[in-house]
Image (cartoon, helix red, strand yellow):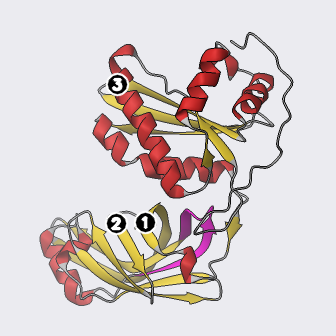
Amino acid sequence: MLKRFVSLSILSFFTMLSLWSQVNQPVLAVLPFSSPKELQNEALQIEKLVQSYITELNLFRLVATADRDKILSEWEFSVNETLMNASNTRQLGTLLSADFLLQGTLGTLGSNFVMTLEVLKTKTGEKVSFSSVEPSVDMLSANLKTLLAKTFMQQNREIQKTIDSEKDILGTWRGDKGIEIVRLYPGGTGKAIFTSGARMDLKYTLENGNLVIYQVSANTERFYHPLPYKVARELVSLAKPMRWIFTDLINNTILQGKKISTAARYEADRLLEVIHDTERDAEWVRTGN
């Protein structure tokens, strides 16, 4: 609960000149995460990971934890009580000099663990939240960057742009289904690592504001995991190279577009039909620079 009221001048915008992106950054305060008593240590570790990942994503200027704790202690602040209405949210945002507040909750659902992230816009009280359910806290932590990026993307959906420069897309990404890591390098090259452990060489071009990425490695059955081995083996000689066409870059963090690849219809371990140039939605999330 907020016990006192002060008159503070509110800065409408906090401008930080990023060394690599040269963009204006809003200020975000990560509030203490809540959890049952038996998960408090895990919640604290995830809170620290969240702060580290937000710094890597380079979307916000973070309020220092020490400054946050001092203010919350001085004003006898209760997270759950204060965030119940927009007026208190605005007041807390003013005290922390923050444009956005992020609150996390760690809990359980049956035998699974649930992580919920909620972002509040301090001026309006508008909020969005996303949750992730995993069988272990370690797996929640592993998917934390993706959960963060989706939460921020939803809060700032209007920040969307075409892809005009190689600098926009260089770095490390979490790929679409089946692809753990993608690394895009200067000069139009890249590499992908699949969940199966397979590695794929890539080339990319920028075409009319779109990012087009091509498979240049020869096919291997491990590209088609978890299809049955015999089916995957046949696809090695039949499938066309994969390619991705990304049309949108959101918040400098999410690539959205489509994947064009070869699909297969099969029964048990028998290949029945090969369907070339199959399209499906694709989304890559930036995980590092």
Q: Specify the quadrant of the image occupied by residue 29.
A: top right
The residue labelled by disc 1 is 173
- Please tell me which residue is depicted at 56% across the width and 87% down the height of the picture: 206
Instruction: Specify few, some or many for label 3: CA neighbours under 10 Å numbering under 14, 14-19, or 20 or more.
Output: few
Q: Is residue 115 above or below residue 59?
A: above
Q: Secondary structure at mark 3?
A: helix
The residue labelled by disc 2 is 181
Q: Secondary structure at mark 2?
A: strand
Pinpoint residue 191: horizontal percent, then vertical percent: 33, 78
Residue 247 part of the magenta segment: yes
* Residue 64 shows up from this direction: yes
Residue 108 part of the magenta segment: no
Q: Main secondary structure of the magenta part?
A: strand
Residue 98, numbered label = none
What residue type is disc 2 on? Answer: Ile
Which mark is nearer the camera, 1 or 3? 3
**Magenta stretch?**
243-256
Is 185 left, or right, of 58 in this rendering? left
The residue labelled by disc 3 is 41
Q: CA distance from mark 2 to mark 3?
A: 29 Å
What residue type is disc 1 on? Answer: Trp
Would you say the residues marked 1 and 2 are in contact, meaning their CB atoms lie under 8 Å apart? Answer: yes
Instruction: Specify few, some or many for label 2: CA neighbours under 10 Å numbering under 14, 14-19, or 20 or more.
Output: many
Quadrant housing the N terminus: top right
- Please tell me which residue is depicted at 69% across the width and 32% down the height of the picture: 96
